[in-house]
Image (spheres, rainbow, N blue to C red):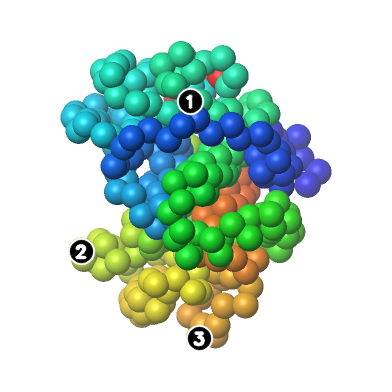
Amino acid sequence: MGDSSQMLANIFEQPSVAERCLAMDLPMPPLPDVDRVIFSACGTSRHAGMVGRSWWQTLLQIPAHLEDAADGYPVQVPPKSLIYLLSQSGQTRDVIDVAQRFPTAPKWGITNGSKTRLHELASYTLQTHAGEEKAVAATKTFLGQLLLLLRVALAWHDRANRNVPQTIVLQSKIAQIPQQIQTTLNQTEVACQQVAQKLVAADRLILLGSGINTAIALEGALKLKETVYLHAEGLSSGDFMHGPIAIIESGFPVITIAIPGSATYDKTITEAKRVKSYGAYLIGITTESAVYDADLFDAVLPITDIDELLSPLLTVIPLQLVAYYMAKNRGLAIDAPRNLTKFIG
Ligand code: BG6
């Protein structure tokens, strides 16, 4: 690494954050009598909530929704709903407002702090134990949020005897996650440096994901806005076809996340080919053994092979690294971007 940046250090701490999150005691309270979960959060934590929503829908087959706490949502909470509040700091005003607006609804929380306002307002709050995150842009705390959401989903599945076959298979795979994160860091860093160099003069970027990885396209775009001040937009690859694709012209940089084995893989590749045919400079985030046409991607940011449902834990890593190296190449204040302040829980 050879760099004193907190952000880079935080990114490289993620294998040990994952080990801690998987090893920590997870005292599960009695399950609330609910038939839906409403995730509410802001910024990076909202993107963790998007992944959580997918996990509740697929691993637990429980209806799940995501609301933007900063935009005044949810406006209503139907009976038998659990509000799941995510906040790195546990102090974000918009998130605390949601908790206070619905005093009688059951509320759970995840935060990186130990004694936060969120602890006071939610009945069951887990701490990510990611360690203090000094860089303003969240990286390791995002991973911690994802891992605790995953562990809670798996524990809920067992406690409620839901017996979802896909979830049972996934249970046996989570112990490998810290090593997979380490391997991905090792595999992808040089490619991220090269892409950051290639994009040295870029003033815009589109990031595409599909299914559970649409959240990661949004999170990648947020990292680039926060640290590089780049006009970056994250969308679902499918939705990008419905109008936004008109923006593509020769050399327009696009990063697409395509994970083999997912229900959306073939469609995503077809969409990527279309984007490429209009002249995009196309960068793929995909697994090391993925098979695709040799001329599809102009550059590849590899991650290690992983089940699609777990892949957000890895696909975010190259995006964190590209943001970091682009900010570094531009001589920006990576750990303390302009216009932003960070609460630490
Ligand atoms: C914003 C920060 O103000 O708050 C984001 O710029 C952050 O980086 C968001 O993700 C939410 O913060 P928290 O502490 O509630 O997760």
> Which residue is rendered at x = 50% and y = 59% of the image?
167
Position of residue 6 measured from the top left corner of the image (x, y, whole percent):
68, 33
Q: Is mark 3 within 8 Å of ligand 1?
A: no
Mark 2 or mark 3: name the one nearer the start of the chain. 2
Q: Are marks 1 and 2 in contact (CB under 8 Å)?
A: no
- Is residue 209 shown left or right of residue 185? left
Q: Residue 107 or 244: which is nearer the viewer?
A: 107
The location of residue 277, given as percent across then percent down, is: 36, 80
Q: Nearer the viewer, mark 1 or mark 2?
A: 1
The residue to which callout 1 is attached is: 124
Q: Which residue is mark 3?
A: 293
Q: Answer yes or no: disc 2 within 8 Å of ligand 1.
A: no
Mark 2, other Cα within 10 Å: few <14 / some 14–19 / many ≥20:
few
Q: Do tag 1 and tag 3 residues touch (Cβ < 8 Å)?
A: no
For ligand 1, the image quadrant comes to top left
Residue occupying image coordinates x 29% and y 42%: 35
Q: Tell me which corner region of the image, top left, top right, bottom left or bottom right, holds residue 45.
A: top left
Q: Is residue 90 visible?
A: yes
Which secondary structure lies at badge 1? Answer: strand
Q: Which residue is mark 2?
A: 243
Q: Which mark is residue 191?
A: none
Q: Quadrant of the C terminus?
A: top right
User: Of callouts 1 and 3, which one flags the residue occurring earlier in the amino acid sequence?
Assistant: 1
Q: Quadrant of residue 141?
A: top right
Type of the residue with mark 3: Asp
Under circle 2, the secondary element is: loop
Mark 1 crowd level (few <14, some 14–19, many ≥20, 10 Å Cα): some
Residue flagged by tag 2: what amino acid is it? Answer: Gly
